């Protein structure tokens, strides 16, 4: 039914040209990061079940783009077409359109609708359908907001993290007789729920140095419940 209503709304509609500016494209920054739960040379304490070492490498990509924020829930209706907005919703600004001497910012709604926002934040009466396609048009219906609202500029930020390599931890499992117990857990790039590989580690309780691969960990104190330690090298 909704598809039919939209199709009818497009009959006799005017072609809509949306101009994209440099500002509307936003910015993206990417940085390689290595997250760990310790600092070299700084003593820490962990209880049974906690990781004494936790390492995760990833690329952090931060995208910032212009947007409008919806101050309160409202509906935008025209003919049989109704668009619903939630308080706090952010609408990306994808370009500008000038009509009747007014330059509107065009904000994207639900992927393929374009809402025309005047400089004062009020919403124009024309809604664009097929946004971003070769067939984008302003629908024939006159739209109005209920209740009347003014959108406010509130640029948005999106953070994405993509694993790139190391993703492991060494968990303290207490002591057993004359040995201190640990478990090495290695995870796949995107799965922190289940280890892809694990290995039980055991060191003499009398030892004050734990060596695993390239890591050297000094043990300051240990009992059945907790361990105090310092990661010296990695």
Image (spheres, rainbow, N blue to C red):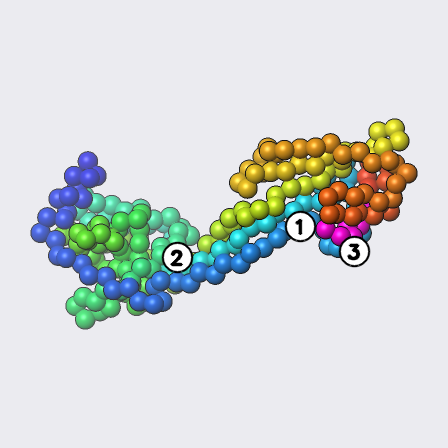
Report whether 124 appears left or right of 150.
left
The mark that comes first in sequence, 2 or 3, is 3
Q: Which type of secondary structure does the marked residue at label 2 adopt?
A: strand
Residue drawn at x 52%, y 54% is 60
CB under 8 Å between discs 3 and 1: no
Q: Which mark is residue 36?
A: 1
Q: Which mark is residue 142?
A: none
Q: Quadrant of residue 98?
A: bottom left
Q: Which type of secondary structure does the marked residue at label 3 adopt?
A: loop
Mark 3–mark 1 Cα distance, whole angstroms, equals 14 Å
Give how far across and how far down residue 175 sits, in percent: 83, 32
Report whether 47 appears left or right of 165.
right
Residue 212 vs residue 100, the one in the foreground: 212
Query: Is 230 contained in the magenta span?
Result: yes
Which segment is the magenta one?
A: 229-234
Q: Which mark is residue 41?
A: 3
Q: Which type of secondary structure does the marked residue at label 1 adopt?
A: strand
Residue drawn at x 34%, y 67% is 22
Residue where numbered disc 2 is placed? 69
Report crowding for label 2: few under 14, some 14 to 19, many 20 or more residues within 10 A (C-alpha).
some
The mark that comes first in sequence, 3 or 1, is 1
Query: Is 195 contained in the magenta span?
Result: no
Please state, as top left, top right, bottom left or bottom right, where the N terminus lies in the image. Answer: top left
Residue drawn at x 19%, y 61% is 17
Report crowding for label 1: few under 14, some 14 to 19, many 20 or more residues within 10 A (C-alpha).
some
Farthest-out residue, bottom: 101
**Residue 105 vertical position relative to residue 209 in the rendered view, above or below:** below
Farthest-out residue, right: 206
Mark 1–mark 2 Cα distance, whole angstroms, equals 35 Å
- Between label 2 and label 3, give the one nearer the viewer: 3
Give how far across and how far down residue 44 sits, in percent: 78, 49
Residue 198 vs residue 153, the one in the foreground: 198
């Amino acid at each position: 039914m909704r598809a039919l209503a939209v199709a009818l709304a497009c009959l006799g509609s005017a072609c809509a040209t949306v101009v994209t500016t440099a500002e509307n494209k936003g910015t993206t920054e990417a940085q390689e990061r290595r997250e760990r739960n310790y600092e070299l040379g700084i003593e820490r304490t962990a209880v049974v079940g906690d990781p004494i070492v936790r390492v995760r490498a990833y690329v952090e990509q931060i995208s910032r783009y212009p947007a409008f924020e919806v101050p309160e829930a409202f509906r935008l209706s025209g003919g049989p077409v109704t668009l619903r907005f939630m308080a706090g919703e952010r609408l990306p600004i994808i370009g500008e359109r000038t009509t009747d001497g007014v330059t509107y910012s065009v904000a994207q709604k639900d992927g393929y609708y374009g809402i025309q926002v005047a400089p004062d934040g009020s919403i124009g009466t024309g809604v664009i359908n097929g946004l971003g396609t070769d067939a984008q048009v302003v629908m024939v219906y006159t739209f109005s907001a209920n209740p009347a609202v003014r959108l406010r500029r509130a640029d948005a930020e999106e953070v994405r993290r993509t694993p790139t390599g190391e993703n492991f931890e060494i968990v303290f499992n207490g002591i057993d007789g004359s040995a201190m117990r640990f478990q090495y857990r290695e995870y796949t790039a995107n799965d922190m729920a289940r280890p892809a590989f694990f290995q039980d580690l055991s060191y003499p309780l009398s030892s004050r140095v734990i060596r695993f691969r390239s890591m050297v960990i000094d043990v300051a104190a240990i009992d059945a419940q907790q361990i105090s330690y310092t990661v010296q090298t990695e």
